Amino acid sequence: MKWSETQRALLILSIVLTAIIFIADLFTPLGIAWGFVYIIVVLFTLWVPGKISSVWFALAGIILTAFCFFVKHAPEVAAYIVLVNRSLSIIGILVTMFGILKYKEKEQIVREQKEKLENLTQELKVSNSEFEQFAYVSSHDLQDPLRKIKSFG
């Protein structure tokens, strides 16, 4: 599959944004929901061909969100708040990933159907052209006896 310059730029932007989100998440209090920002990264993969990029960036977001939960210690924030925050972030990332995968699957089906339709249209044009030639020859051949009858008359 061939990637356009825009798609490559989106992929690079997604990588850079993932790194920025991770660094910001490491240096801010646990109560802030940085994990939700990974959803934007996963959404960028909507314009990148193939399904695997969506899965990889979603997994990266989930792993980095969980990693920050285990690495950072913040006694000033209640554990259940952090756990709910991180869990909701992971659920949001997963829902976004599955939505994009479903969208790309349907997009692939539409692309295949469009290709089939174009092939059938081309075959129909060829068939119509052959039919027009047949109709012309038949018409010419059927008019020949009429011309002979006129000439005898």
Image (tube, grey):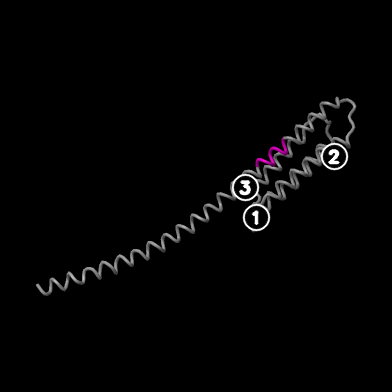
Q: What is the span of residues highlighted in magenta in the rendered image?
A: 92-99
Query: Residue 135 bears which disc, if any?
Result: none
Q: Which residue is mark 3?
A: 105
Main SS category, magenta section: helix
Residue drawn at point x = 65 percent, y = 40 percent: 99
Specify few, some or many for label 3: CA neighbours under 10 Å numbering under 14, 14-19, or 20 or more: some
Give the CA distance from mark 2 to mark 1: 32 Å
Q: Secondary structure at mark 3?
A: helix
For the image, the number of numbered tags is 3
Query: Residue 67 bears which disc, if any?
Result: 2
Q: Which residue is mark 1?
A: 5
Q: Is residue 84 left or right of residue 135?
A: right
Asked if the stretch drawn in magenta spans residue 110, the answer is no
Using the rendered view, name the quadrant where residue 70 is placed: top right
Residue drawn at point x = 23 percent, y = 68 percent: 142
The answer to the question of whether label 1 and label 3 lie on touching residues, with beta carbons closer than 8 A, is no
Amino acid type at circle 1 is: Glu
Query: Where, quadrant-wise, is the N terminus in this rendering?
Result: bottom right
Amino acid type at circle 3 is: Glu
Q: Position of residue 91 (x, y in %)?
A: 74, 35
